[in-house]
Amino acid sequence: MRIVAVVLGVLVLTGCTGGAGLVVDDSGDAVLVSAASNRDVRNLALIEGELAITESGCFGIDNGRAVFPAVFAVGTVPDGDGIYLVGHGHVAVGDRLEGGGGFASESEDSLPKGLPAECVADEVAIFDLAED
């Protein structure tokens, strides 16, 4: 297992659809959701855990207490047994991720619009690069 540490920011994803604010790739073994742009970056909070796949089949982050579906950095794509993070390379399922981000909540109606059904949960990790 390796540790991938990145400096990240929370991306506000309001009024988004699969094509406007989110990029959804379901061509691999799990659904990958990434941001379409780095606009509206704000707040840094620590997100850490292992890259995982949720029970419903969405890439996410396992923080040891739960597996949260995640919206990843702009340009993130499926890559073999994991994902490719722009500027950081391949991250395999089980590799540790550390960086900034935050959480969107279904109960607070803050989930990104256009999030695929497989990736909807009460809390979704927003794990996004804070650079354009």
Image (cartoon, rainbow, N blue to C red):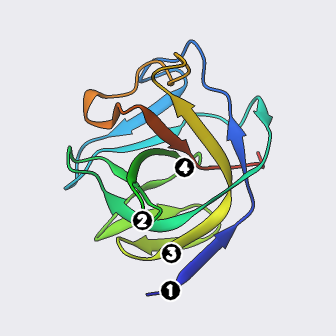
Q: Mark 3 to mark 2: distance in Å?
A: 6 Å
Decide: marks 2, 4 in contact (CB < 8 A)?
no
Residue at image mark 4: 75
Q: Which of marks 4 and 1 is nearer the N terminus?
A: 1
Q: Which residue is painted at 75% across and 61% down in the image?
A: 7
Q: Earlier in the sequence, mark 4 or mark 3?
A: 4
Q: Which residue is painted at 55% across and 19% down in the image?
A: 108
Say which element carries label 2.
Answer: strand
Place of residue 73 in the rendered image (x, y in percent of width and height, measured from the top left) = 58, 49
Q: What residue type is labelled 3?
A: Arg
Q: Mark 4 to mark 1: distance in Å?
A: 21 Å
Q: Mark 4 to mark 3: distance in Å?
A: 19 Å
Decide: marks 1, 3 in contact (CB < 8 A)?
yes
Identify whether 80 is placed above or below 106. Answer: below
Residue sticking out furthest to the top? 15
Q: Which mark is residue 96?
A: 3
The crowding category of the residue bearing disc 2, from other C-alpha atoms within 10 Å (few below 14, some 14 to 19, many at least 20), is many
Q: Mark 2 to mark 1: distance in Å?
A: 11 Å
Q: Quadrant of the C terminus?
A: top right
Residue at image mark 2: 51
Q: Which of marks 3 and 2 is nearer the N terminus?
A: 2
Residue at image mark 1: 2
Say which element carries label 1.
Answer: loop
